[in-house]
Amino acid sequence: MVIETRPATAFDDVAAMVGPKRPDANVCWCLSYRIPSKENLSLRGSARGERVKSLVRSDPPPGVLAYDGDTVVGWAAVAPRADTTFARNRKIPHVDDRPVWSVWCIRVRPGHRGEGISHRLLAGAVAFARDQGAPVVEGYPVDNAGAKVDLTMAYVGTRRLFEKAGFVKAADTTSVLATFPRVLMRLELR
């Protein structure tokens, strides 16, 4: 299996990875960290998908997709931290004032888990950020010390996943997800 990552410019493929089964359902659509909280809370049903469609059309697009041939099998959200709610998040510290990019959501399609796709997605997100001129990429995974993480909360990744990609712990956070503390991991790109 050869997994290829590409910028998330195909709305239908983004929808297949983060959208609901019913277009009118109120699911995350990977918007909760991407847009201001007030806007996120105001969007309902199909308006959420329309907002994602506008992000997919933007430059840069809101993340990367992983493909096995023509089949989309994964998603990773990556954007400048300044363009996310992490810019104002009080639980996740700022290490410095450099224009870092954030990776905050990694999803692998059911039936394709356990095949290393999350590693390819993280590598693809880093490459995308590098191509956009990012000097540093951050992630905010759980520090689960090898314990099992519930799939619904595994979207932030694990410290081990980020360490395998060359990231190093830059700071503790006061954020907790599914009882696990989150850490700020960084990868210098230049």
Image (cartoon, helix red, strand yellow):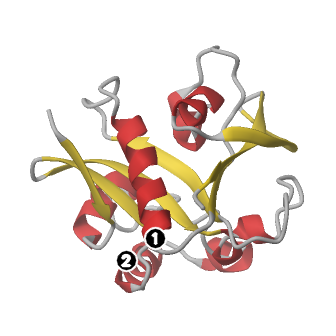
* Residue 114 placement (x, y as % from top left): 34, 23
| Residue at the image position 46 percent from the left and 46 percent from the top | 122
Task: Give me the residue at 34% from left, 53% from top.
Answer: 17
Secondary structure beneath dot 2 equals helix
How far apart are labels 2 and 1 at the CA level? 6 Å
**For mark 1, what is the residue?**
62
- Image quarter where the C terminus lies is bottom right
Give the vertical position of 171 relative to 12 (above or below): above
In the rendered image, the vertical position of residue 108 relative to residue 114, given as above or below: below
Q: Amino acid at mark 1?
A: Pro
Q: Earlier in the sequence, mark 2 or mark 1?
A: 2
Q: Indicate whether 19 appears above or below 111.
A: below
Instruction: Answer whether labels 2 and 1 touch (C-beta < 8 Å).
Output: yes
Image quadrant where one finds the N terminus: top left
On residue 87, which mark appears?
Answer: none
Q: Give the residue furthest to the left.
A: 69
Find disc 2 in the rendering and name its residue. Answer: 56
- Estimate the x, y position of residue 83 in percent, counting from the top left: 64, 77
**Which one is in front, 77 or 136?**
136
The image quarter containing residue 11 is bottom left
Q: 44 left or right of 1?
A: right
Say which element carries label 1. Answer: loop
